[in-house]
Image: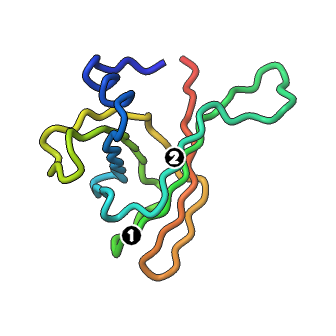
Amino acid sequence: MVNVSQSYLDKSLAPGRNVRCRIIADEEVYTDADIISFEFNDVVHPDDMTFGTSCANRFQFEIRSRHNIPLTAVIRPFIGFADSPDDDGNNIEECALGEFYITRRYRKRERYSVTCYDRYDIM
């Protein structure tokens, strides 16, 4: 469960809400202007689970970028809600969806298609 502020919760439930997405890939920041698709699937697992396995969250996205995204990049997606459709980013309430690691990356010219999974560390 992710803890969010009351303001975030109110904006997420409001009719006509203004959704904003942001992706940080190492040091590069991609916003709605760059993002083609943004899909977060929490707890992806097969129908049959065996003892000792874990469930992973999957994040898939497509962006337009001239920058190289290395396979070792840590991907940090955010979803937020703005006060208005033309908000320049000053009044956006965001929620981090986690840290993800690239498992598949495909590039065709300036279009990237990336699949990532989070990692569960046993301490």
Residue type at mark 1?
A: Asn
Query: Residue 69 in the image: x percent, y percent?
Result: 41, 63
For disc 1, the neighbor class at 10 Å (few under 14, some 14 to 19, many from 20) is few
Residue 55's disc number: none
Who's the residue at 24% across and 50% down the image? 85
Q: Which residue is drawn at 28% across and 55% down?
A: 29
- Image: 114 above or below 50: below
Viewer-closest of 33 and 28 = 33
User: On the rendered structure, is 7 left or right of 51?
Assistant: left
| Helix, strand or loop at mark 1 | loop
Residue at the (42%, 78%) spot, across then down = 110
Q: Mark 1 points at which residue?
A: 68
Alpha carbon separation for disc pair 2 and 1: 15 Å
Give the residue type that dot 2 points to: Tyr
Q: Residue furthest front?
A: 15
Residue 6 coordinates in the image, percent (x, y): 28, 17
Kindly state the secondary structure of the residue where label 2 is placed.
strand
First in sequence: mark 2 vs mark 1: 1
x then y, percent, for residue 118: 54, 37
Where is 62 relative to 96, above or below? below
For disc 2, the marked residue is 101
* Residue 101 drawn above or below residue 61: above
Mark 2 closeness class: few <14, some 14–19, many ≥20 residues within 10 Å: many
Quarter of the image with the C terminus in it:
top right
Residue at the spot 56% in from the left edge and 69% down from the top edge: 106
